[in-house]
Image (spheres, helix red, strand yellow):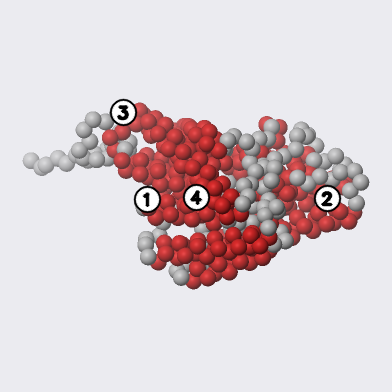
Amino acid sequence: MGVVHTQRKPDQASGSNRGFQLPRSWGLAVSVLCLGLLVGLSSGLLARFFELTQVGLLGFAETPGTPTAEAVPPIRRLASVTIAGLVAGLVWAWLRTRTRLVPSVGQAVKGAPMPPGRTVVHVLTQIFFVSAGGSIGREVAPREAGALLGGLWTRMGRRLGLRDQDGPLLVASAAGAGFAGIYIAPLTGAFFGIEVLLRRVDAEVVTVNLAMSALATLVGGSIKGFAPYYKVGSEPFRPWLMAAVLLIGPVMGLLGAGFRRMTSWAEAHRTTGPAAIWQLTVVALLTGLVALAVPQVMGNGRALAQMGMDQRLSAGFSGLQLAQSLALLVLFALAKALLTTATIRAGAFGGTLTPSIALGSAMGAVLGLLLACLVPGLPVWQCAVIGAASLLAASQQAPLMAMAMLMEVCHLPVMAFMPMGLAVALSMAVSRLFVAKA
């Protein structure tokens, strides 16, 4: 008689000597609760670290009211970002040549282990570099910290009755929660996990992502506050704004696709090894030199985004003033795009979400100022916000996340969804024509 071999079913928890185990649903609930709180704590602490290093290096702490380091002496701006470029270059060169490379969040979701010590160094270096004025986003750092915690939890949580397939879900949700906890944006964090990392939708995926991001937002906000990240006007969103969207959406789709190509090229050709030390120092020096006159190019782009959202076309605004505003917005946006691309190419790690918002806000304000000449009373800041969401959607190919992010970080009313939704749809339609060819 032959021997009958039995095979373990895939939805059984892994681990041969399991002992007592919780039912899977309970284990998943415990995981969401614990990871949500832990990731929120890590994001809140990273936000505090950013503030402390920014004050220490620049003598300045950004707020929605004062997002630009204009009051900081120009020479200090130059010294801060240049020294930070040298230090960050040394650390990243060491991480890439002396140790194993820290996996990306996407790789971690697919099962690549994130080494705790090196990941923490990598995360803190990103925050340090941006706080000193490096031209790159800082949103990757809290996502990587969240992914690290999610990975460690899944490896230690075998007694919770979790399946092997639960690992990617928890890591992706924790990464999104890391974003939610630092920008106080629970829907954005959830959509990032669902739309960008997992790319699948079912009741369990949505529930886990929403719950974890909400908990992380609660903890992160308790540490750093719940104030909006950007300051915007108070005028209501009117239905006739939909006409302006017909122009803003497609233009932002084109610009967003272009920025995506630029940063994708920079990431594919990112400098590795010792050359990153001098290249990143040179790019940081260049950033500092530009910041002598234009401090808006420093950091993750918050200052430039706020500049776009602050634009108004008031009565008595002369043609010369209009031309100056348009020229400055275009030049600052171009400088920000080039410096961010150069920073990534030189060996830096970080995000492109907030730089995308900066570019979209500036260029949306350009279109808003022009349209306001034809339609008196048009709130330019609304065009800037819609431009930011549209360009972000195109550059990240994540429309739901982009809309949620601008709604949450600006504390916008629900009526904003109407023009923003159409703008993002048009932006995505245009950008897909170019992204597909890339």
Residue 141's disc is 4
Q: Which residue is mark 1?
A: 116
User: Which marked residue is nearer to the observer: mark 4 or mark 3?
Assistant: 4
Q: Amino acid at mark 1?
A: Pro
* Sooner in the amino-acid sequence: mark 3 or mark 2: 3
Would you say residue 226 is visible in this rendering?
Answer: yes
User: Viewed as shown, does residue 298 lie left or right of 202?
Assistant: right
User: Is label 4 in contact with label 3 (beta carbons under 8 Å)?
Assistant: no
CA distance for labels 4 and 3: 33 Å
Name the front one of labels 2 and 4: 4
Q: Quadrant of the C terminus?
A: bottom right
- Amino acid, disc 4: Ala
Looking at the rendered image, the disc whose residue lies closer to the viewer, 1 or 2, is 1
Q: Residues within 10 Å of mark 2 (few under 14, many from 20)?
A: some
Q: Relative to the observer, which residue lies in front, 96 or 94?
A: 94
Q: Secondary structure at mark 2?
A: helix
Residue at x 64%, y 52% (from the top left corner): 301
What mark, if any, has residue 370 been given in the picture?
2
Q: Name the secondary structure under disc 4.
A: helix
Mark nearer the N terminus (2 vs 4): 4
Give x and y (percent) for residue 405: 61, 41
Disc 4/disc 1 C-alpha distance (Å): 13 Å
Q: Do the residues under discs 4 and 1 have CB atoms within 8 angstroms? A: no
Occupied quadrant, residue 257: bottom right
User: Which is more N-terminal, label 2 or label 1?
Assistant: 1
Of mark 4 and mark 3, the one earlier in the sequence is: 3
**Helix, strand or loop status at disc 1:** helix
Decide if residue 309 is on the left or right side of residue 115. Answer: right
Q: Measure the alpha-carbon separation of dots 1 and 2.
A: 51 Å
Disc sitting over residue 23 in the figure: 3
